[in-house]
Amino acid sequence: QQVFDHSAGGHIPTVREPEAAHRDGIAEARSALIESIIAESEDETLMDRYLSGEDIDVETLVDDLETAVSRGSFFPVLGVCSTNGLGISALLELLVGGFPHPGEHALPTVTAIDGSAVEPLSPDPAGPLVGEIIKTTIDPYVGRVSLIRVFSGTLRPETALHVSGHGLADRGHDDHDADERIGSVLSPHGRTLRPVGQCIAGDLCAVTKLLSAETGDTISAADRPLLVAAWEMPEPLLPIAVSAKTRADEDALAKGLSRLVAGDPTLRLERNAETHQLLLWCMGESHADVVLDRLRAQGVDLATVPVIVALRETLVGPAEGLGRHVKQSGGHGQYAVAKVSVEPLERGAGFEFVDKVVGGAVPHNYIPSVEKGVRAQMAKGLEAGFPLIDLRVTLIDGKAHSVDSSDAAFQTAGSLALREAGARAGVALLEPVHDVFITVPDEHVGTVMSDLSSRRGHVTGTEAIGAEHTVVRAEIPESSLIRYAIDLRSATAGTGRFTRTFLRYDPMPDSAAAEIRAASKD
């Protein structure tokens, strides 16, 4: 029994005998590990031999470990630190000595670009070239570096490749196909890239300057393009609103974010058209910290600000409003009068514009102008600056001038009429509500239920999953979900997960709505 001591710093540990106080704990942990490996062994006599006191040799344990890992029934977990390299050497030793050879497990399904079936892959260096980009980095000196895992065939320098990326459009990665030519094939050794003559099936290598390639893309021979199924990536659920501290940093922020998103398909970048915030969606707090640290390491001076939820406005009741836009002071003036009635509609009904003008009070060619003005005011909102939804506006009367009326004048009159009607009808603020599925171990269900109450969540059902897990379904306001990825992880010791789907807009509580209205007037 040995201890790997990292207390002196550096990624290479000092190997020594354990202190007496730790020996019993180490022995117990080692026995538990050995028993776990033996329990997965195909040799049914091995457990009996172990329990009878036989000392099982390490070679047998390693062989059984490799077999169990290959079957997917055993998942080793090692502690490592990516920032200072602690534990990396032990991880590499386990990968080399305890994991199956690339040719010993199934390869991914591959199709033609159009989705038609092709022959299954085999890890044959003489087979058709198929690989997958498993990581993308941007080097300040050589540019884009694509790390490739070769499943089949042989990748050689100065080769024409076909690059395909499909199935990640929801992450901001549009489907793309392109033919490109690589230069050198490189073998990564830490920060150093060494040229090699080839990269065969089962190997990892790097190439530079694949301009259209992103993480998760398939590379194949240009004369025989193929496609590996897109990765099933978890949905990032933690939004971080970022902004450059100065205008001079905006370009650096944009470039830094594009580099990170190209290399990490679990990131999603979104520019919210309503709140005008730049949102970086991450998997969790640790993920966000790493991303922000990388941006700052690139010299980007950035700030994180509270995420703004895109609300909606609607009317409380029916009302009428008069919009009068008259400017006649000599010469060509402006004249338009529009009278409208408004009434709220049920949630999700959208917008209806009805023309009930009689007698030509508003000329037919100006009625679309009134509607255009109403729609423009709806987009701006009436109280807090959020779009107005779910209402019917009826044009019931108006006036025009044979000379001074115009399209622009009636647009303004329509806008003014809606504003007056809204002031009389009353405006309610609506917040987005999501349908949320939360999967947690049974022992944490009570904690999750209690927490949902504090978030104004409404539980709509529960379902047992297997013997130890429960799915809690709830309707939760979006504002209560901004940090839920962090809070759920904390409440369930990292074992809880959730998915969310937009459901509808519901009225906000009066106290919360009052705060929004006050903030909009500042």
Image: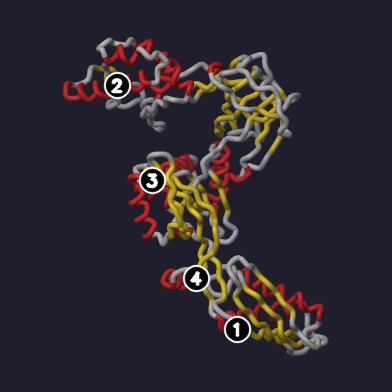
Residue sitting nearer the eye, 248 or 517: 517
**Going from the N terminus, do you reach mark 4 or mark 1 first?**
1
* Amino acid found under the numbered disc labelled 2: Phe
Question: In terms of image quadrants, where is residue 135?
Answer: top right
* Amino acid found under the numbered disc labelled 1: Ala
* Residue matched to label 2: 4
Specify the color scheme: secondary structure
Report how far apart the C-alphas of labels 2 and 1 lie in the structure.
77 Å
Residue at 60% x, 17% y: name it. Answer: 123
Q: Can residue 244 be seen by looking at this rendering?
A: no
Within 10 Å of disc 2 (Cα), the crowding (few <14, some 14-19, many 20+) is some
* Percent of width and height locating residue 405: 78, 83
* Residue matched to label 3: 489
* Residue matched to label 1: 319
Query: What kind of element bears circle 3?
Result: helix
**Going from the N terminus, do you reach mark 3 or mark 1 first?**
1
Q: Which mark is residue 520?
A: 4
Residue sitting nearer the eye, 475 or 398: 475
Q: Which of marks 2 and 1 is in front?
A: 1
* Percent of width and height locating residue 358: 78, 86
Question: In terms of image quadrants, where is residue 78?
Answer: top left
Within 10 Å of disc 3 (Cα), the crowding (few <14, some 14-19, many 20+) is some
Report how far apart the C-alphas of labels 3 and 2 lie in the structure.
30 Å
- Left or right, 432 with respect to 178, comes to left
Q: Nearer the viewer, mark 4 or mark 1?
A: 1
- Left or right, 396 with respect to 483, comes to right
Residue sitting nearer the eye, 17 or 114: 114
